[in-house]
Amino acid sequence: MLTAYAISDAGLAPVTPEASAAGAPPAWLDLFAPSPEEEHAAEAFLGALVPTREETQEIEFSSRFYVENGVVFMTASVIAGLDAGHPVLTPFTFGVGKSKIVTLRYEDTKAFRQFLSVAPKPDGGCGTPTGIFNGLLEAFIARTADVLEHIAQAVDRINSEIFTRKASERIRSKRLSILIGAIGMQGDLASKARESLSSLERLAQYAAAMLPDQALKNGNGTRLKLALRDVRSLEDHVNFVLNKITFLLDATLGLVANQQNQVVSVLTVASTILMPPTLIGTIYGMNFKDMPELGWGFGYPLALGIMVVSALVPFLYFKRRGWL
């Protein structure tokens, strides 16, 4: 799908082919999972080749950041699908020219929708292609910050459930397994957020170095520096969150191991207590003809008494030592 936007005093607004022919030329083309015809139209508009989907997914720096015919192409990995419960990293490409900009995306992201709700306003800061670029970059950074807040809240809930005294008294192995899964989900999401922030930082640095000085005037250069500063502060925060997630995972695995050790300890003590009675019962269950105890009238109750005493003595010893 191809959508064209024009810049006017009233702000950013979508334009139709009829309006464009009437004298309102578009300044921004947004490509969402475009067809080959739409890609050709964008290339004619921008004067440079639009990268393919395979090229946007490359991890090499040269494939994601380059200049062609005066157009600066930059690709970042942004988070999508969080609201649907299936977060993924998807490429988002900017092609910034002197007076035109093209964006290329393959997933519908909440950050993009939030940007479109603010961009049409006259004071939205989208009066130039660089302003549109900065606005989208700020939207992606803000959305990533929201994701980190969501992760931090989830991690705090998990932390409370693990270490609160009332919770720790009733927590069981099955619940711990569920918590391990929840910790893993938050860790995966935090890793995606860190990867996205890393790509956004490289994008902001490349834009600051390669966009022409004229494009960075009217406050756009300052906005870019502030965006870069925000990205770096969020990277520090996501590293802190990941460290806390690692700690919670280690603590949860430690609780699981502790519960397993308690079970093994009980079984060991029980087998030790039952070992002497079992030995006595085994000896007197052999029924040899010449066993003198076979003729005793009080032999059976005596054997039972010895078995009880032999089990009681180690039980009291373990109880005194605090092993039970």
Image (cartoon, rainbow, N blue to C red):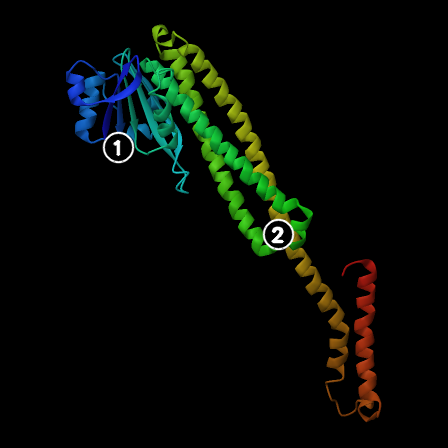
Q: Identify the residue under disc 1.
A: 33
Quarter that holds the C terminus = bottom right
Secondary structure, mark 2, is helix
Q: Identify the residue under disc 2.
A: 256
Type of residue at label 2?
Val
Residue at 48% of width from left, 39% of height from top? 188
Residue 191 left/right relative to 22 = right
Q: Callout 2 environment at 10 Å: few (<14), some (14 to 19), or many (20+)?
A: some
**Front-most of residues 121 and 97:** 121
Secondary structure, mark 1, is loop
The CA distance from mark 1 to mark 2 is: 46 Å
Quarter of the figure with residue 139: top left
Q: In the image, which disc is placed on residue 113?
A: none
Residue at 72% of width from left, 67% of height from top? 270
Question: Do the CB atoms of the residues marked 1 and 2 lie less than 8 Å apart?
Answer: no
Residue 70 in picture, x, y percent from top left: 27, 12
Q: Callout 1 environment at 10 Å: few (<14), some (14 to 19), or many (20+)?
A: some
Question: From this viewpoint, is residue 89 visible?
Answer: yes
Residue at 69% of width from left, 48% of height from top? 165
Instruction: Specify which label sits upstream in the sequence, 1 or 2.
Output: 1
Residue 285 in picture, x, y percent from top left: 73, 85
Quarter of the figure with residue 212: top left
Residue 311 left/right relative to 38 = right
